[in-house]
Image (cartoon, helix red, strand yellow):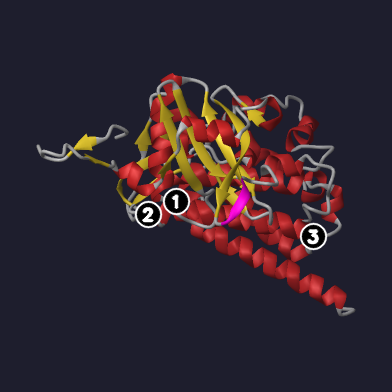
Amino acid sequence: MFVKYSKHESSSNKKCPTVIEELCHQFSLEELRKSTNNFAEDRKIRKSLFSIVYKGYLKHSGETEYPIEVKRMRNLSDEWKFKKEIELHSKLHHPNLRSFIGFCDHKDEKILVYEYMLNGSLYDQLRSRNMESLSWKKRLEICIGAAKGLHYLHTGTKRTVFHCDIKPQTILLDKNMVPKLSHLGFSLQGKLSKSNPKPVKVDTLIGTLFYMAPEYVRTNTFTDKCDVYSFGMVLLEAVCTNYKYTIFDKMNVLDNPNIFLERPNEVAKFLERFAAYEIIDPILMRLIAPWCLKVFMDVMKKCLNIDPNERPAMGEVEVELEHALALQEETDDGKMNGG
């Protein structure tokens, strides 16, 4: 897929671009070295087992300092992941998916280039001390945007795409705090059409254990409802977490908090056992309209249902979250008008 091929025997022996090269830009290693000041340490954004991400700058649309994220793969045995991420990002286009700019495939260097996300991830913001930038209304808007992106992956493409790693760390935020789903390298595609996606069996579990649906952990079989469960965990974190306490801290009220890593279905029991005011961030609790809270908690619990058949589709989740936002705005407008 990455190797240029020749047309039928011709005297010019002219090379034709591959499908990927037609869909996105291929950078030279020198271009990306220059954009990151030779992968300087002070340009490093984050580091993981799989990659090192740098901030770079390119000339674009007249701008000499257009920011980009340069993701340098660390393990060349993950070349399949590199290719997969390019192929998917090249074909998928949605306001709530992170924009893919191009790639570099140079000998031992495998590099992906994306739009720069000024506000990091939802994970970063939930743990920041700036509660104003992540008000309850803003949290709702972020959840709605992420739901739209996931709904698009499930139904907006020719074949359903299962994200497989939905969590606050993979929901990135641009300069306007608009959420964009990222990390499609682990995603799976349904075998049939989007109207009838077939479950995908995997040899090794993909994703992050705490966010995995119980049936996926048990059977190694992934469906769209597994993504819905993971999204329910994101909703749980969005309403429970501030800079001081995470949902993990809240779970310490139980005798054995590690049980949630061993038996994910205990999350549903946790929600049944404790009232909303006991687990929701106390600062947010004072600001959430009662009817908004009810709708939000209902859709979150549905997403986290033990029975995957009882979980809603992402389109339903999106509609319910928008309803919750409308109820919140109605209450806020009433307060402003002295109601």
2 or 3: tag closer to the N-terminus = 2
Residue type beneath disc 2: Thr
Q: Residue furthest right?
A: 338
Tell me the crowding category of disc 3: few under 14, some 14 to 19, or many 20 or more residues within 10 angstroms, Cα based: some
Residue with the mark numbered 3: 288
Disc 3, SS? loop
Range shown magenta: 62-66
**Residue 312 seen in render:** no
Question: Tag on residue 153?
Answer: 1
Q: What's the CA distance linking mark 2 and mark 3?
A: 35 Å
> Residue 315, how many percent across, how many down?
50, 59
Q: What's the CA distance linking mark 1 and mark 2?
A: 6 Å
1 or 3: tag closer to the N-terminus = 1
Residue with the mark numbered 2: 157
Tell whether 288 sits left or right of 122. Answer: right
Q: Is residue 304 above or below residue 217?
A: below
